[in-house]
Amino acid sequence: MSELAQQAAKRLESALGSKVSGTFEDGRGVVVRVEPEAVREALGVLKSDRECPFDMLSHVAGVDWKTWREETGLESPPARFGLVYALYAVAKRTRIFVETFVADGQSVPSATPLYASADWSEREVYDMFGVKFKGHPDLRRIYLTDDFEGHPLRKEFPRHGHDPQDHPQE
């Protein structure tokens, strides 16, 4: 993959030390795993990188790993929810991914002070998975109504949703 992303990952590892739990390459590209409390710090280091500044946050994605072990037989991730931050260095045309894992009820520092584009992505993850972002300026549902109960992309959410009569249209 991209040598620039690999070098940026090494600079991030040296800047954050033990807050980085690993760096690897997969189908996405270069991925750096960090502790949840270090997410904003990691994104800040990558955004201000002199060699390859990652000036664009494409999106934040969430994954519910609750039934991973039962479904695959493989080792489960360290916590229930995975968060993936996709960064792009526009001038260098290079991608890197920052990944972290959070337990149910655990919150993560918001990336909105660094990237305005994190606003809606974090709201989407909150709405669909229930992961909270500390310091987010307006953390509320983005797709579902405020009175909707549950988070549809969690594994325990009913596959066929709720009965439409439970939520009559107005």
Image: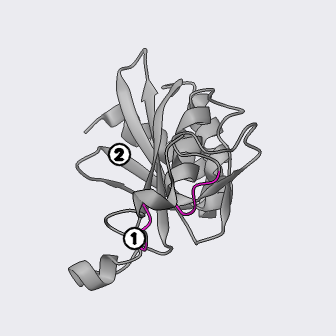
Q: Nearer the viewer, residue 127 or 84?
A: 127
- The spot of residue 131 in percent (x, y) is 59, 58
- The spot of residue 120 in percent (x, y) is 56, 34
Q: Is residue 91 visible?
A: yes
Judge whether residue 79 is colored magenta: no
Quadrant of the rendering where the N terminus is positioned: top left
Amino acid type, callout 2: Val
Q: Earlier in the sequence, mark 1 or mark 2?
A: 2
Magenta residues (range)? 147-156
Write down the quadrant of residue 139 in the picture. top right
Instruction: Left or right? Give the position of 37 relative to 161.
Output: right
Please give the label number shown on residue 30: 2
Cα distance in 3D space between marks 1 and 2 = 28 Å
Q: How is the image coloured?
A: one colour
- The spot of residue 96 in percent (x, y) is 41, 39
Does residue 90 lie above or below 143 as drawn?
A: above
- The spot of residue 101 in percent (x, y) is 52, 64
Q: Nearer the viewer, residue 69 or 128?
A: 128
Mark 1 nearby-residue class (10 Å; few <14, some 14–19, many ≥20): some
- Identified at 57% across, 55% down, the residue is 148
Q: Nearer the viewer, residue 69 or 16?
A: 69
Q: Secondary structure of the magenta portion, mostly?
A: loop
Amino acid type, callout 1: Lys
Quadrant of the rendering where the C terminus is positioned: top right
Say what secondary structure mark 2 lies in.
strand
Please give the label number shown on residue 83: none
**Residue annotated with mark 1:** 155
- Identified at 42% across, 44% down, the residue is 97
Does residue 169 lie above or below 22 as drawn?
A: above
| Residue at the limit of the structure toward the top, as seen here | 91
